[in-house]
Image (spheres, rainbow, N blue to C red):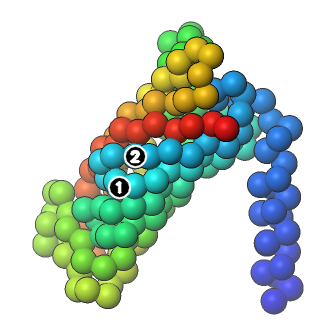
Amino acid sequence: MKRNMIAIVIVLIFVFNFSTIHAQSPQRKNFGFGVIVGDPTGGTLKFFTQRNNAFVIDFGASYFGSPRIGVDYLWQFNAFNSDIANLYAGSGGTIGFGRGDGFYYKDKYIREKNNVGLGARGVFGVNFIPRRTPLEVFFEVGVLLTLTPDFGSSADVGVGMRFYP
């Protein structure tokens, strides 16, 4: 119980400390929310932890399992020497609930109604931040490696937009 309370306090300090970070996001805001279309199709949240690092949470309907929740840690790179376009890469995990199908190894991803699928994910993408707007538009490609209930691989693609209030 004590260990759980310590973890909760650390997470809360981490989350509420975002206001001191000058993020590489629209208008240097540290939190954005929006929509993603692809895999998954649903909502997306982005929390900057440092200027070039962020946590992204995606949730919604997915081919991997519906619903799907994924968390990625991203590193942003100013590869284009631009304040409008950036590349990013990251890794994370995904949980799919219910029936799921796979892209490459379909037999490996089919689950019964109440099964849960757990996978590791690597992601690479590009984001665009139009000047003087609170918006971020992004396109990403991910590789998903299913760990349970069976081992397999898949790919997912997403395009979306986040608003930074």
Q: Is residue 85 above or below residue 58?
A: above
Confirm whether residue 124 shows in the render.
no
The alpha-carbon separation of the residues under discs 2 and 1 comes to 7 Å
The circle drawn on residue 154 is none
Along the line of sight, the residue nearer the viewer: 125 or 57: 57
The local crowd at label 2, few if under 14, some if 14 to 19, many if 20 or more residues have their Cα within 10 Å, is many
Q: Is residue 119 left or right of residue 8?
A: left
The secondary structure type at the circle numbered 1 is: loop
| Residue 34 x/y as whole percent | 50, 45
Query: Which residue is at 16% across, 57% downward?
Result: 104
Callout 2–callout 1 Cβ contact below 8 Å: yes
Identity of the residue drawn at 84% across and 48% down: 17
Number of marks drawn: 2
Q: Quadrant of residue 144?
A: bottom left
Query: Which residue sits at x=78%, y=30%?
Result: 22
Q: Which amino acid type is shown beneath numbered disc 2?
A: Ile
Q: Amino acid at mark 1?
A: Pro
Decide: few, some or many residues near mark 1? Use Cα within 10 Å; few <14, some 14-19, many ≥20. many
Residue, disc 1: 40
User: In the picture provided, is 18 more to the left or to the right than 163?
Assistant: right
Residue 146 found in image quarter: bottom left
The image shows residue 141 at horizontal and vertical percentages of 34, 40
Instruction: Report which residue position mark 2 lands on.
Output: 36
